[in-house]
Image (cartoon, helix red, strand yellow):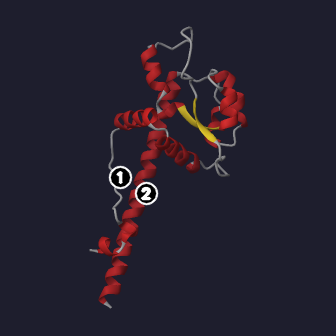
Amino acid sequence: SVQTHYPLFNPPFHFKMIEDNQFISDTMQLKSKKPDPIKMLLKILAYVDEKQEALLPDKWQIEHIFPRKWNDNYDLNGFTADKINELVETIGNLTPFEKSHNIKASNEYFIKKRKSYKQSKIAMTQELSRLTDWRPENIINRTNEMIRKLKSILLTWNDNYDAAKQLYDQQHRAEEST
């Protein structure tokens, strides 16, 4: 077998398509257990952004756009407190943010954080400064958009892997027959 002799394609990579709700649930569980996989997903999204011209800063954190701690008099737009607490941990409410800016933004509401977002060197975070408000609907829409992008990226990687493996296998067979 080619895989036995050539570890480049061992173990094989295959991205299995999952439903959006499962993806949301899985990312929420990852966030609560260990932030590294979420950081990786955010980093992927940051680097595929055409506006991101430089490497991400060395010291960045996961920023909760809608704060984890919020007061009860905030207009929830018909959403329950339980639903807000659930949305706060979805990937659509998260963005990579320089540690120094994140400390300053703390648990402030979006309107106060916008100035810090504008100063960010991370394009996807800076883009948030153009919005006038951040509501549960924004979290849902951004979550869906980020999932769509991630699935597209992973499917592209899968296709590229399969094409490269196929070419590699053809070349190896040709070498063996000579």
Find residue 54 and name its label: none
- Residue that badge 1 annotates: 15
**Measured along the vertical axis of the image, is residue 82 above or below residue 170?**
above
- Residue 163: where, in percent of width, then height? 38, 67
For numbered disc 2, what is the local secondary structure?
helix
Q: Quadrant of residue 4?
A: bottom left
Q: Which mark is residue 157?
A: 2
Q: Is residue 66 left or right of residue 148?
A: right
In the image, farthest residue toward the left? 1
Question: From the viewer's perspective, is residue 125 above or below residue 49?
Answer: above
Q: Residue furthest bottom?
A: 178
Name the residue at 51% across, 14% down: 76
Give the structural element (helix, strand or loop) at label 1: loop
Disc 2 vs disc 1: Cβ atoms closer than 8 Å?
yes
Classify residue 5 as left or right of residue 160. left
Q: Quadrant of residue 21?
A: top left
Q: CA distance from mark 2 to mark 1?
A: 8 Å
- Could you tell which of marks 2 and 1 lies nearer the N-terminus? 1
